[in-house]
Image (cartoon, rainbow, N blue to C red):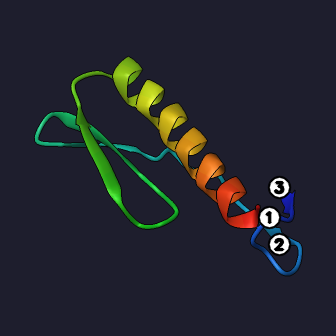
Amino acid sequence: MYGMRAQDIAPATHFRSDRLTRVNGDLYFSTRENTLEGPFSNHEEAEREVRAYIERVRLLSRERIS
């Protein structure tokens, strides 16, 4: 995908990848901020927490702009 994210200064190619990984049987997800979030016991819980994490980051970003 060729485009710009809010923090980018110029258009670039961005590739999505699977951010879920298993460590000792538990699921974690990695973030752009290079953190590993979890553990989660199943895929549904991990996906739900990914969405919640994205929403928290968006809210924090809006607060900084205001």
The residues tagged by marks 2 and 1 sit, at their Cα atoms, a distance apart of 12 Å
* Left or right of 61 in this view: 5: right
Residue, disc 2: 12
Q: Which amino acid type is shown beneath numbered disc 2?
A: Ala
Q: Nearer the viewer, residue 30 or 15?
A: 30
**To which residue does mark 3 refer?**
1
Report, in whole angstroms, how far the alpha carbon at label 2 lies from the one at label 3. 8 Å
- Name the amino acid, label 3: Met
| Mark nearer the N terminus (2 vs 1) | 1
- Give me the residue at 52% from left, 62% from top: 32
On the picture, is 21 further left or further right than 17? left
Q: Identify the image quadrant of residue 22.
A: top left
Q: Mark 1: few, some, or many residues within 10 Å (few <14, many ≥20)?
A: few
Residue 12 lies, in percent from the top left, at 83, 72
Provide residue 48's location: percent of width, then percent of height: 46, 25
Question: 64 or 15: nearer the eye?
Answer: 64
The residue drawn where x is 59% and y is 55% is 60
**Taking 25 as reference, is 50 left or right?**
right
Mark 1, residue position: 6
For marks 1 and 3, give the CA distance: 15 Å
Which of these two is toward me, 23 or 53?
Answer: 53
